[in-house]
Image (cartoon, helix red, strand yellow):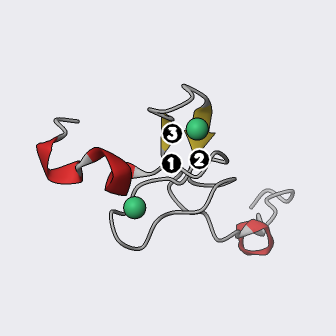
């Protein structure tokens, strides 16, 4: 049996990885993502720093 096989401790690297969504603001066209920006609890959209989210745009009518 050869030595040198190390247990790779991937467990320590575990980070709470959350799927990051990216889109752009429909108001100011800025690139926004769900990591750096808040998500609106109502429309589940990403709230831009300008304050825009899908709520203002009629989410149900918007074809994504
Ligand atoms: Zn914006
Ligand atoms: Zn909203």
Q: Which residue is mark 3?
A: 22
Compared to residue 39, the image places residue 50 above or below, namely: above
Alpha-carbon neighbours of circle 3 within 10 Å: few (<14), some, or many (≥20)? some
**In the rendered image, which residue does mark 2 sit on?**
48
What's the distance in space between the residues labelled 1 and 3, CA to CA?
Answer: 15 Å
- State the separation of the CA atoms marked 3 and 2: 11 Å
Residue for badge 1: 52
Locate residue 29, reporting x and y percent: 54, 25
Question: Exactly how many numbered labels are in the figure?
Answer: 3
Give yes or no for contact between labels 2 and 1 (Cβ–Cβ under 8 Å).
Answer: yes
Q: Is residue 28 above or below residue 34?
A: above
Where does residue 14 sit, x and y in percent of width and height?
Answer: 70, 70
Instruction: Name the quadrant of the N terminus.
Output: bottom right
Callout 2: SS: loop
Residue at horizontal 61 percent and vertical 29 percent from the top: 30
Residue extending farthest to the top is 29
Left or right, 64 with reference to 5: left
Determine the secondary structure under disc 3: strand
Beta carbon at label 2 within 8 Å of ligand 1 = yes
Q: Are marks 1 and 3 in contact (CB under 8 Å)?
A: no
Say whether disc 3 or disc 2 marks the residue closer to the N-terminus.
3
Foreground pick, 13 / 31: 31
Return the disc, 1 or 3, that comes first in the chain's sequence.
3
């Amino acid at each position: 049996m050869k030595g040198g096989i190390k247990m790779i401790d991937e467990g320590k690297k575990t980070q709470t990885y959350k799927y990051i969504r990216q889109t752009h603001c429909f108001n100011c066209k800025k690139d926004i993502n769900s990591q750096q920006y808040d998500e609106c609890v109502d429309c589940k959209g990403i709230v831009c720093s300008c304050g825009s989210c899908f709520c203002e745009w009629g989410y149900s009518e918007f074809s994504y």
